[in-house]
Image (tube, helix red, strand yellow):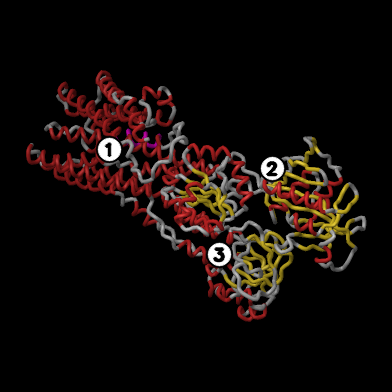
């Protein structure tokens, strides 16, 4: 079947003929045949990455490939010399460990993403052979007759057979939060918002319906939008590209210096070919950060896991870098900046204005007049609140600590107002019997219910738009009586309505009418000559902590922009409350304004604007594109299926975990489990922290590896014995890079992390640190080279010299890890906190020292590594050398590096 069949303009008999069905539904056999023909009623899912591909990807890194080449050269050298393959095995062990760590982390991430993609299982009530039956929504087929009621999600595109006071929330498709009325009447022409059609993914907010399924799965309107989203290509992860770029540069440096060393050793110093090969392997291993792929993956994974515990699910590890670079947050209002819980704040009665305390759907709160609590026996107030509860088709469900609204949020606010006065539906049902009702529709802008009371009286209760209720009223209720409603009073209430609306309050008016008992009521006759009761003003209040989060973002150089489908006045008022706009900077642009602008005009607006109201999903795409043209890194929130293109367009697409559709979650990079703006800011903080910790490790790894690289190059150039063989370098890198690297991955954020501007995403990983890395590695090289020359001069044993050299390097490099914790101060200026501020790093220092001492003093290990035990005096020389080279790095130099960057 197809949407092009224009089901909304066809008579039901014609539809039944086309679908070969009837009001009794399909038979089980026919339904099974159609299931095989049309396929399951679900959206097509993108195929995940296979296990083989994940495994193969682990060996595509340039860093890993160089290690494999080094292992091959080491094996060749060992076979020629007739020596054990110890170096080869150690190098391959490192390669395998990297591959295993990377594989399992990516496999877990892929499985987590697959779990997020799965739609929540939905069961549907339908007719099969005339009997009601509950089945899995995936088994629905065209021609099925479904039965839906308030709270149900529409399982497939369907044409309404019969509707009873039906209202549907179509926000997932249209972005409009106001429910729309639906009925079974045939339309004269096809329209996009067909009033006799129900669309997959939308929700029944009130009433009930019986409908025939016309399209399922990818043929639904929901499915077609999902298909467009799935066709968008994803860009390569920027962090991975930068790491690969850095790896290629390191490889190039390694190759050039290998050629240099080979030429000097072989052609000028007449070194044996096998020895030159061994030296080349040593150089290659010292230049390559073999632990980098695993450390990057672990650091990102640990950070992402912490984000998940704080309600931010990052679907791709690579998105963490982009989060830390975010410069603009385009946030929806409802449910993200606000609570998505309408709350009554004002009640206006005859010559009285009352304040209502409390927030959201909690019944805690009271009604106050002139700062005094209003008692529950206030007749005027009680009648208005009772009207709000009786003229109401919604329901509030409470289970443990969760609250679920079945119906409209505005009506839920009226039920909560009733609870604050202990006027509940359950209590009223004991004395009031519902006789008839006329639900709200956009044409009448009001709702009426008729109740027979236990005292024999029949009364109609009304609520609706103030201008409508006032126009249809001829009396106003006063204490236990009603008087004529004059023009001055009507004008007074209209002004009060405008005043409340300007303060972002949604205003409803209430009234009643005593009627005689009848079998059937005429809507037009009923809804006139009403007795006016008063007004209620309500608002969706800001979430707790949002104002602080917006201020934190502002200090961090991140601009917050409200992008909402709500009205301009509401958007402006909430924006002022939470601090998005202030003073004269309060221009609100509407979707209509945007559609009248060219792209260049829009680009000028987005530079200054902070609030966009009444925007469509297409407008959100243009806004995201405009910010990206200006070089901004944009985070965009969305929850509807039509928001998916905007989420794809943004640098970081953020879907809502509570009210978001499966399509929006699929299109997003991050999912907010609590739909809270503050969670976005916390995720940006965490993203910056993760990236900082990665650069800390890179500074440690490169400065210490360059130190080893320079040492070997200098020794060969000066015709000295090879100071370190491959197995030594791998050991040093394991205990001085590996353990501290894992500790640095959980290093606490620096205190000013949200007081600095976002990092330029085009900037290299270490652009601001290269001078620091080079100077630090040269200082480390000078000290270690001096110790090596000293030990060669004072000892006849090469093993002893290598042992002292290795130990001094280990001391220097594990102490250098503490220096990387700050990019402003050296270890002395950091004080005690520099050493104990990260207890994992302090522990890694102790473990590394113990391992190095064990290597020197356990005979089996020292024999494998060709090392010798050291005396206390020799250990003292190594320790002083290591600490001395670190203290040579002055604080002013570190600060100058930071200042030049800023």
Does the residue at mark 3 contact the one at mark 2 (Cβ under 8 Å)?
no
Image quadrant for the N terminus? bottom right
How far apart in space, not on screen, are marks 1 and 3 (Cα)? Answer: 55 Å
Near mark 2 (Cα within 10 A), the count class, few <14, some 14-19 or many ≥20, is: many
Determine whether 20 is above or below 690 in the image.
below
The secondary structure type at the circle numbered 3 is helix
The main secondary structure of the magenta stretch is helix
Start-end of magenta stretch? 730-743
What x and y, as percent, mark residue 514? 88, 58
Picture residue at 70% right of the left edge, 56% below the top: 407
> Could you say whether the residue bearing mark 1 is in a helix, strand or loop?
helix
Q: How far apart are marks 2 and 1 (CA)?
A: 61 Å
Q: Mark 2 points at which residue?
A: 359
Residue identifier under label 3: 222
For disc 1, the marked residue is 730
Q: In which quarter of the image is residue 95?
A: top left
The reply to whether the C-beta atoms of the residues labelled 1 and 3 are less than 8 Å apart is no
């Amino acid at each position: 079947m197809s949407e092009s069949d224009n089901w909304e303009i066809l008579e039901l008999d014609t539809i039944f003929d086309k679908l070969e069905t009837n009001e009794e539904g399909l038979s089980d056999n026919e339904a099974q045949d159609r299931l095989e023909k049309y396929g399951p009623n679900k959206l097509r899912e993108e195929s995940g990455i296979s296990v083989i591909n994940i495994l193969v990807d682990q060996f595509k890194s340039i860093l890993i490939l160089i290690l494999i080449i080094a292992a091959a050269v080491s094996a060749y050298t060992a076979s020629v010399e007739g020596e054990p393959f110890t170096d080869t095995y150690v190098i391959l062990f490192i390669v395998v460990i990297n591959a295993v760590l990377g594989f399992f982390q990516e496999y877990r991430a892929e499985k987590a993403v697959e779990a997020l993609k799965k739609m929540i299982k939905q069961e549907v009530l339908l007719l099969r052979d005339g009997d009601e039956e509950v089945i899995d929504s995936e088994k629905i087929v065209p021609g099925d007759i479904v039965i839906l009621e308030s709270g149900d999600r529409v399982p497939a595109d369907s044409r309404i057979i019969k509707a009873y006071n039906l209202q549907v929330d179509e926000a997932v498709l249209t972005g409009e939060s106001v429910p729309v009325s639906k009925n079974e009447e045939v339309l004269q022409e096809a329209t996009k918002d067909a009033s006799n059609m129900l669309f997959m993914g939308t929700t029944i907010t009130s009433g009930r319906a019986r409908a025939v399924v016309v399209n399922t799965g990818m043929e639904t309107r929901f499915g077609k939008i999902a298909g467009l989203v799935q066709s968008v290509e994803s860009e390569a992860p920027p962090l991975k590209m930068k790491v690969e770029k850095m790896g290629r540069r390191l490889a190039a440096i390694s190759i050039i210096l290998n050629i240099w060393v080979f030429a000097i050793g072989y052609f000028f110093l007449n070194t044996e070919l096998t020895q030159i090969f061994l030296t080349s392997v040593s150089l290659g291993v010292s230049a390559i950060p073999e632990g980098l792929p695993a450390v990057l993956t672990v650091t990102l994974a640990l950070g992402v896991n912490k984000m998940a515990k704080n309600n931010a699910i990052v679907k791709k590890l690579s998105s963490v870098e982009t989060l830390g670079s975010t410069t603009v947050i385009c946030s929806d209002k409802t449910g993200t900046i606000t609570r998505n819980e309408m709350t009554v704040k004002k009640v206006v009665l005859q010559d009285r204005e009352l304040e209502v305390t409390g927030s959201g759907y909690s019944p805690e709160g009271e009604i106050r007049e002139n700062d005094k609590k209003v008692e529950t026996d206030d007749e005027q107030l009680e009648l208005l609140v009772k009207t709000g509860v009786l003229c109401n088709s919604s329901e509030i469900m409470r289970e443990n600590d969760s609250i679920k609204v079945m119906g409209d949020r505005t009506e839920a606010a009226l039920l909560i107002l009733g609870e604050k006065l202990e006027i509940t539906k359950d209590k009223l049902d004991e004395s009031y019997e519902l006789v008839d009702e006329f639900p709200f529709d956009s044409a009448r802008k009001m709702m009426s219910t008729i109740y027979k009371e236990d005292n024999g009286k029949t009364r109609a209760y009304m609520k609706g738009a103030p201008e409508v209720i006032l126009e249809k009223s001829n009396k106003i209720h006063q204490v236990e009586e009603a008087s004529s409603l004059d023009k001055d009073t009507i004008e007074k209430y209209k002004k009060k309505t405008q005043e409340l609306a300007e303060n972002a309050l949604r205003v409803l008016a209430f009234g009643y009418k005593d009627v005689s008992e009848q079998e059937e009521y005429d809507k037009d006759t009923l809804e006139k000559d009403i007795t006016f009761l008063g007004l209620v003003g309500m608002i969706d209040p800001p979430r707790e902590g949002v104002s602080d989060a917006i201020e934190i973002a502002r200090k961090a150089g991140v601009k917050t922009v409200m992008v909402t489908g709500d009205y301009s006045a509401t958007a402006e008022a909430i924006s002022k409350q939470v601090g998005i706009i202030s003073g004269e900077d309060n221009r609100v642009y509407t979707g209509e304004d945007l559609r009248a602008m060219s792209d260049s005009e829009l680009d000028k607006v987005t530079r200054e604007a902070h609030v966009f109201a009444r925007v469509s999903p297409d407008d959100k795409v243009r806004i995201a594109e405009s910010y990206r043209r200006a070089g901004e890194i944009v985070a965009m929130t969305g929850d509807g299926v039509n928001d998916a293109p905007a989420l794809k367009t943004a640098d970081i697409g953020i879907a809502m975990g509570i009210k978001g559709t499966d399509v929006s979650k699929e299109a997003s990079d991050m999912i907010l489990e609590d739909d809270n703006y503050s969670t976005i800011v916390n995720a940006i903080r965490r993203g910056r922290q993760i990236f900082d910790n990665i650069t800390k490790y890179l500074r440690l790894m490169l400065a210490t590896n360059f130190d080893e690289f320079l040492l070997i190059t200098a020794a060969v150039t000066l015709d000295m014995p090879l100071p370190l063989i491959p197995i030594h370098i791998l050991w040093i890198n394991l205990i001085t890079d590996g353990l501290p690297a894992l500790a640095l991955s959980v290093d606490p954020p620096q205190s000013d992390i949200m007081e600095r501007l976002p990092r330029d995403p085009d900037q290299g990983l270490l652009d601001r640190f290269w001078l620091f890395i080079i100077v630090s590695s040269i200082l480390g090289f000078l000290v270690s080279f001096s110790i090596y020359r000293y030990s060669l001069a004072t000892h006849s044993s090469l093993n002893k010299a290598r042992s002292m050299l290795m130990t001094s390097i280990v001391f220097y490099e594990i102490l250098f890890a503490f220096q990387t914790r700050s990019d402003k101060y050296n270890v002395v200026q950091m004080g005690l906190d520099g050493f104990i501020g990260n207890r994992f790093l302090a522990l890694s220092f102790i473990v590394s020292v113990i391992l190095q001492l064990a290597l020197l003093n356990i005979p089996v290990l020292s024999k494998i590594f060709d090392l010798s035990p050291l005396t206390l005096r020799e250990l003292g020389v190594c320790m002083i050398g290591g600490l001395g080279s670190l203290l040579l790095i002055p604080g002013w130099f570190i600060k100058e590096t930071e200042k030049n960057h800023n």
